């Protein structure tokens, strides 16, 4: 990879060290340009007129996303964030009383809350797939759980918001297909970070966001729904983009995945997402994944050298999201200390509120999270380590 070029495309790296890519990564110049160009076009022409002029570019966003995850263009819906994309898929599923949803202990609270809501409203059951010795879902346990005919859905994140294991999603997908069970995959932290191929994984639905590892603008995300499934899922919400009114009594719903979208959207951000996908594809997802994993391993090794710091990541395969605790300082104190360095260092905090099951199992309330992208460097990691070593202890 041409790291110098990656960094040249990322203006902010001259001023700060950004290790909050799992929160929102720094946008590269082509993304910033795509967004600002469109805002300027809107200012010059009018919003609808600008969208009209860019209609082919907007279509190209779908083609690019489809290419990124090896899907078809008509299987992609562009939705304002990963959560709403996920909701649109989940709440369209015809789940009935007694139906079982299987998830992992690494599930994101934003997804777990809807399970609980449907447990309360419709009487579905939630079961958490036990973990294996590496902390990732146990495929043996999953196989056994799938013997229950009431299992209607497997739904889990590829990579949790607080890092941890990269789940064995291809094996989960194969088990789901063999059992005839739907598989909804939250690839929010995975898309842009690692290769994601919906054909290989065999998931029926997948969600992702723009602003994290894809490096797109905020307020954008997307949903993939397999073509064979799409028309049998009736979106929980409809509007005049997703459906058309045929008479005072009748409407028809679009047949493609855009039935999960709504009409009004931030066209500049959508084009920015498209630019981000093109940028990621041009860098090569596999080399980026190799580099991110390498940087993650390097940071974990260096963290382990610091007295009082405990790396917290589990998993046979780990990602670029690196978490740790400090035995004398809270995650907020660590964050504040790093932000106050001569060269500001951005890290974030992951609390039990976003991954309750996992944090409870590991008896953790919070962790510091340093999430690395391919444009980060070993030198930046060394600066972080030096700053952590200087952190005043009690
Ligand atoms: C695993 C996971 N799923 C879903 C989301 C939600 O994404 P969004 O904020 O784009 O809705 C996040 C955000 O942190 C996440 O980490």
Image (spheres, rainbow, N blue to C red):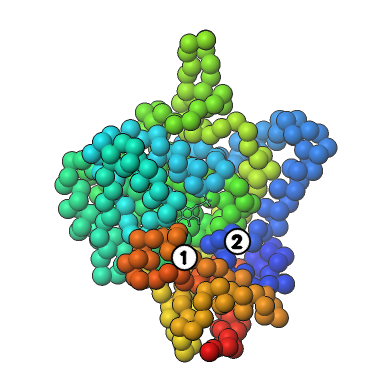
Camera sees residue 13: yes
- On the picture, is 28 further left or further right than 78? right
- On the picture, is 163 further left or further right than 263? left
Q: Quadrant of residue 152?
A: top left
Find numbered disc 1 in the image and state the secondary structure of the residue it sits on.
strand
Please name the residue that numbered disc 2 is placed on.
25
Q: Nearer the viewer, residue 384 or 119?
A: 119
Q: Position of residue 215 (x, y in %)?
A: 60, 57
Q: Position of residue 304 (x, y in %)?
A: 44, 84
Q: Nearer the viewer, residue 21 or 312?
A: 312
Q: Position of residue 336 (x, y in %)?
A: 62, 75
Find numbered disc 2 in the image and state the secondary structure of the residue it sits on.
loop
Number of numbered callouts drawn: 2
Q: Is mark 1 within 8 Å of ligand 1?
A: no
Please name the residue that numbered disc 1 is placed on.
351
Residue located 33% across and 32% down the image = 94
Residue located 35% across and 46% down the image = 116
Q: Position of residue 272 (x, y in %)?
A: 65, 48
> Spatial distance from mark 2 to mark 1, Cα to Cα?
19 Å
Question: Which one is in front in this view, the residue at disc 2 or the one at disc 1?
Answer: 1
Decide: is 50 above or below 188: above
Q: Earlier in the sequence, mark 2 or mark 1?
A: 2
Camera sees residue 66: no
Decide: is 369 above or below 57: below
Q: Quadrant of residue 180?
A: top left
Residue 150's mark? none
Quarter the N terminus occupies: bottom right
Residue located 56% across and 32% down the image = 262
- On the picture, is 156 further left or further right than 99? right
Mark 2 Cα-neighbour bin, 10 Å: few <14, some 14–19, many ≥20: many
């Amino acid at each position: 990879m041409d790291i110098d070029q990656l960094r040249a495309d990322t203006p902010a790296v001259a001023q700060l060290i950004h290790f909050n890519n799992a929160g929102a990564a720094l946008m590269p110049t082509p993304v910033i340009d795509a967004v600002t160009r469109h805002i300027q076009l809107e200012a010059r022409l009018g919003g609808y007129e600008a969208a009209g002029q860019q209609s082919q570019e907007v279509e190209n966003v779908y083609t690019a996303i489809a290419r990124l995850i090896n899907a078809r263009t008509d299987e992609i819906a562009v939705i304002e964030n990963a959560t709403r994309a996920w909701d649109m898929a989940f709440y369209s599923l015809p789940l009935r009383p007694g139906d079982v949803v299987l998830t992992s202990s690494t599930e994101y609270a934003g997804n777990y809350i809807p399970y609980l809501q449907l447990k309360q409203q419709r009487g579905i059951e939630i079961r958490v797939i036990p973990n294996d010795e590496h902390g990732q879902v146990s495929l043996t346990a999953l196989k056994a759980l799938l013997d229950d005919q009431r299992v209607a859905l497997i739904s889990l994140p590829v990579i949790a918001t607080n890092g941890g294991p990269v789940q064995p999603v291809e094996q989960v997908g194969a088990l789901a297909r063999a059992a005839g069970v739907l598989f909804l995959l939250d690839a929010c932290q995975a898309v842009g970070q690692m290769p994601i191929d919906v054909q290989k994984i065999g998931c029926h639905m997948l969600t992702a966001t723009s602003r994290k590892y894809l490096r797109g603008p905020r307020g954008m995300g997307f949903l993939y729904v397999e073509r064979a499934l799409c028309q049998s899922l009736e979106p929980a919400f409809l509007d005049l983009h997703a459906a058309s009114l045929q008479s005072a009594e009748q409407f028809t719903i679009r047949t493609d995945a855009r039935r999960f979208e709504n009409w009004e959207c931030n066209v500049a951000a959508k084009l920015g997402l498209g630019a981000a996908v093109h940028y990621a594809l041009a860098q090569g997802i596999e080399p980026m994944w190799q580099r991110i994993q390498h940087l993650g391993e390097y940071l974990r090794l260096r963290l382990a050298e610091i007295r009082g710091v405990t790396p917290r990541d589990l998993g046979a395969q780990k990602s670029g999201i690196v978490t740790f605790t400090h035995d004398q300082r809270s995650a907020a104190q660590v964050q504040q200390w790093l932000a106050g360095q001569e060269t500001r260092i951005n890290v974030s905090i992951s609390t039990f509120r976003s991954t309750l099951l996992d944090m409870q199992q590991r008896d953790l309330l919070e962790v510091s999270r340093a999430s690395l992208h391919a444009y980060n460097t070993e030198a930046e990691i060394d600066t972080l380590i030096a700053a952590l070593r200087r952190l005043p202890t009690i």
